[in-house]
Image (spheres, grey):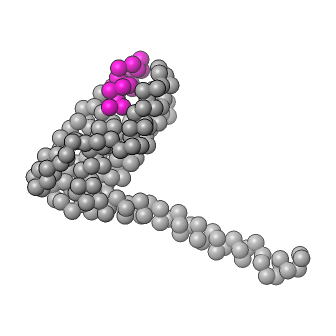
Amino acid sequence: MTHFSKTCYSEDKLMKPFILFASAAIALLPAASQAATAKLSAIEYIAKAGASDMYEINASKLVLAETQDDQLKSFAQMMVDDHTKSTSDVVAAAQADGITPGAPKLMPKQASMIAELKRANGPARDKLYKRQQLMAHQEALTIQKGYATSGDKPNLKAAAATIVPVVTRHLTELKQMTAS
């Protein structure tokens, strides 16, 4: 058996193709994620951006009502202000592109996250909020970047491009808060 494994199926011969396949798959993940986002129609983009903003605003208002953390209060208020503005910007851009957007609606995942925040209290809520915000902002950044790059309506595409640095700043602040 030792002779067989050394001559026909050495670990090196089996591992090289596996490592190459795994490396290629990992390298394609960001492109696949971006490609899925890049294919958003204007209507899909408006719905996803609106839901994202609505989640940010609602989650932040919950935290503002109870947190004792001044840094988190400041961040949550910035979320309410910035995401209210981005919703307004997307609606104005959609209208300029001849689209009348409907009212934003939370996606089921976002509604679940809001419910989870409502069940938490005090420092546990603050910690959960930060964790959710990191995830939500990473998703929002993917949506905004994707549409800014490959959107099908010029005014919406421009609005997405102006939102990207705002979401990037939010992510930077979140990472600093969670690191401390």
Vertical relation: 146 (above or below) 177: below
Q: Residue 140 in the image: state x and y as whole percent.
A: 34, 47
- The quarter of the picture where the N terminus appears is bottom right
Residue 99 falls within the magenta-colored stretch = no
The residue located at (48%, 29%) in the rendering is 127
- Main SS of the magenta segment? helix
Vertical relation: 58 (above or below) 171: above
Please tell me which residue lies in front, 82 or 177: 82
Tell me: 73 left or right of 30.
Answer: left
Q: Quadrant of residue 41?
A: bottom left
Vertical relation: 70 (above or below) 109: above
Residue 69 falls within the magenta-colored stretch = yes
Q: Which residues are magenta?
A: 58-76
Please tell me which residue lies in front, 58 or 72: 58
Vertical relation: 10 (above or below) 91: below
Q: Residue 28 in the image: state x and y as whole percent.
A: 47, 66
